[in-house]
């Protein structure tokens, strides 16, 4: 009988140790990554961390959405040049991109913004830069000339000092007042 009880005790102890070891392994996993759903562990998806540029973009876009007053670019069609002008006002926000196509998902070419972290050193690496106002383009020998309205967009030409077209740029219509 003694020979029969000893192996049973060893088997029981071994089984108990294995269960204890499995529980330790489960507890060693970071609790924040798992939730209990019935008797199984389900891994929670990690929330993506925003890059510095993404967080700047998100914060400034939110600020614009929450702003009561906004500065818009101006076009006076009664003048022969149809130049788009924007004067920054530190007390009134503005932030809008110029796009390669009349679609906000297309490539961004330039930015006008009141926010220093949008403009200083062109952090978004836009082909034609980032500016507080259109005078920043003037400093580089460039101007924006209104061409036409195309659905929800304004079609403009970026021109050099001699009036030669450099490229076509589209702005959301809501950011430009046409007189």
Image: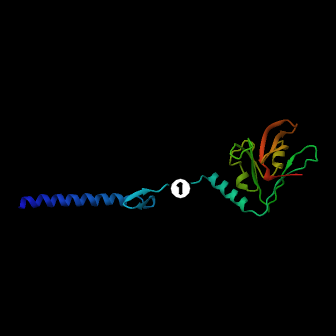
Taking 23 as reference, is 167 left or right? right
Taking 74 as reference, is 104 left or right? left
Rendered location of residue 84, percent (x, y): 85, 47
In the rendered view of the protein, which quadrant contains the N terminus? bottom left
Rendered location of residue 133, percent (x, y): 81, 52
* Farthest left residue in view: 1
User: Residue visible at 32% across and 60% down?
Assistant: 24
Residue under numbered circle 1: 47
User: Residue visible at 84% across and 54% down?
Assistant: 87
Rendered location of residue 112, percent (x, y): 77, 51
Taking 22 as reference, is 148 left or right? right
Rendered location of residue 120, percent (x, y): 72, 51
SS under mark 1: loop
Colouring of the image = rainbow
User: Residue visible at 84% across and 39% down?
Assistant: 160
Residue 105: image quadrant is top right
User: Residue visible at 63% across and 52% down?
Assistant: 54
Q: Nearer the viewer, residue 40 or 162?
A: 40
Q: Nearer the viewer, residue 118 or 58?
A: 58
Crowding around mark 1 (Cα neighbors within 10 Å: few <14, some 14 to 19, many 20+) is few
> How many numbered discs?
1
């Amino acid at each position: 009988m003694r020979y029969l009880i000893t192996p049973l005790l060893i088997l029981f102890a071994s089984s108990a140790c294995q269960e204890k070891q499995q529980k330790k392994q489960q507890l060693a996993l970071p609790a924040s990554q798992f939730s209990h759903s019935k008797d199984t562990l389900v891994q929670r998806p990690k929330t993506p961390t925003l890059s510095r540029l993404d967080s700047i973009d998100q914060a400034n876009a939110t600020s614009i959405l929450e702003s009561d007053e906004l500065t818009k670019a101006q076009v006076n069609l009664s003048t022969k040049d149809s130049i788009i002008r924007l004067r920054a006002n530190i007390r009134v926000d503005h932030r809008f991109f110029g796009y390669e196509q009349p679609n906000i998902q297309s490539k961004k070419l330039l930015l006008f913004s009141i926010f220093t972290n949008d403009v200083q050193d062109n952090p978004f690496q836009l082909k034609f830069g980032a500016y507080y106002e259109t005078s920043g383009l003037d400093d580089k020998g460039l101007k924006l000339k209104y061409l036409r309205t195309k659905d929800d967009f304004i079609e403009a030409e970026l021109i050099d000092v001699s009036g030669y077209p450099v490229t076509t740029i589209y702005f959301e219509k809501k950011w430009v007042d046409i007189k």
